[in-house]
Image (cartoon, rainbow, N blue to C red):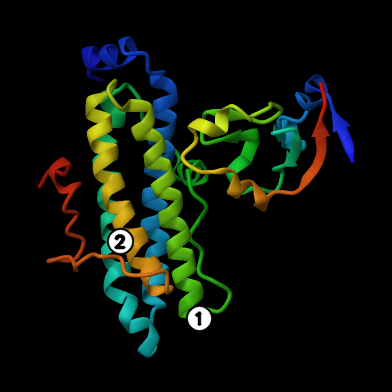
């Protein structure tokens, strides 16, 4: 499986119509096709290209919704 | 804009510009849902569709009421609706509640309705979480809308066999028992 450093992940913010990736608990998810991640932002508050592990705790949904997105890699330090 | 009203919210630590983006995107979700629910509602036909008509109609009208209730608060906080309605549609907080490929499939229609309500429940829970104890007026408004969205979710999930909603019917179509106090006659 492909690995991403945090610096590499920051390239995938959806800018210029590019891929939309984010990390959660060490996995990198591809949200490019997700309606909820249009333009690389989710519900105004969350940006792609980041590790959102801590953010999910405050979200009005659980990690079960992430199962809808393909995992395309792992986040490494 | 209500200048001091906005200042109070900022002083309490809320990012008002972010809050406004959320309110506008959720207002967009309400108005677009009203539109898409109109199409879903007219396609609830036949014996199967008949049983769902009245709750679909109540949810449709109440979602329009939610849009109406949100607009004043957006402007009070210094925000605005987009000038272009097409742009407004595209910033909706929730996906379009499109008619399924087979409009005669009542279960598929119900699934669309249910998914739309669940998106709204999450959206207003988020706004309540952000504003609780800090922006009392937006919190009251978001909470009132949340009450009704939860009821909408429960109605549709009951029809999909997820157990009793526990609710009784509206006394009048689109009654909005929680949001009506924010609407001006």
Residue B75: which quarter of the image? top left
The residues tagged by marks 1 and 2 sit, at their Cα atoms, a distance apart of: 19 Å
Residue assigned mark 2? B59
Q: Say whether mark 2 and mark 1 are on the same chain.
A: yes
Can residue B83 be seen here? The reply is no
Residue at position x 46%, y 50% in the image: B119
Residue B110: which quarter of the image? bottom left
Residue assigned mark 1? B105
**Left or right of B66: which side holds B87?**
right
Quick one: SS at disc 1? loop
**Left or right of A50: which side holds A45?**
left
Residue at position x 30%, y 23% in the image: B77
Quick one: SS at disc 2? helix
Q: Which residue in the rendered view is the most extreme toward the bottom?
A: B47
**Position in image of residue A7 (x %, y %):** 80, 19
Within-10-Å neighbours for mark 1: few <14, some 14–19, many 20+: some
Label placed on residue A26: none
Q: Which residue in the rendered view is the most extreme toward the left?
A: B185
**Left or right of B36: which side holds B168?**
left
Within-10-Å neighbours for mark 2: few <14, some 14–19, many 20+: many
Residue at position x 22%, y 34% in the image: B140
Q: Are marks 1 and 2 in contact (CB under 8 Å)?
A: no
Q: Earlier in the sequence, mark 1 or mark 2?
A: 2
Seen in the picture, residue B175 relative to B48 is either above or below; the reply is above
**Left or right of B25: which side holds B175?**
left
**Position in image of residue A59 (x %, y %):** 50, 35
**Position in image of residue B96 (x %, y %):** 50, 56
Residue A37: which quarter of the image? top right
Chain assignment, label 1: B
Seen in the picture, residue A24 relative to B56 is either above or below; the reply is above
Chain assignment, label 2: B
């Amino acid at each position: 499986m492909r690995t991403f450093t945090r610096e590499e992940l920051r390239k995938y913010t959806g800018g210029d119509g590019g891929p939309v990736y984010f990390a959660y608990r060490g996995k990198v998810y591809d949200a490019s096709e997700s309606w909820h991640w249009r333009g690389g932002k989710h519900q105004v508050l969350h940006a792609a290209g980041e590790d959102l592990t801590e953010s999910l705790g405050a979200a009005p949904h659980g990690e079960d919704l992430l199962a809808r997105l393909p995992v395309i890699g792992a986040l490494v330090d | 804009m209500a200048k001091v009203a906005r200042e109070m919210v900022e002083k309490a630590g809320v990012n008002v510009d972010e809050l406004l983006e959320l309110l506008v995107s959720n207002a967009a979700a309400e108005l677009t849902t009203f539109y898409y629910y109109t199409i879903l509602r007219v396609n609830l036909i036949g014996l199967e569709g008949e049983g769902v008509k009245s709750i679909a109609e109540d949810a449709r009208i109440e979602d329009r009421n939610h849009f109406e209730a949100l607009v004043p608060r957006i402007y009070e906080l210094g925000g605005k609706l987009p000038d272009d309605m097409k742009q407004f549609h595209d910033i909706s907080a929730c996906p379009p509640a499109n008619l399924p490929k087979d409009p005669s499939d009542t279960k598929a229609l119900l699934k669309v309705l249910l998914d739309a309500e669940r998106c709204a429940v999450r959206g207003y829970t988020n706004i309540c979480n952000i504003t609780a104890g800090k922006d009392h007026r937006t919190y009251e408004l978001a909470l009132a809308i949340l009450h009704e969205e939860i009821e909408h979710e429960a109605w549709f999930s009951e029809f999909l066999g997820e157990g009793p909603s526990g609710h009784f019917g509206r006394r009048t179509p689109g009654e909005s028992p929680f949001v009506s106090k924010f609407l001006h006659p």
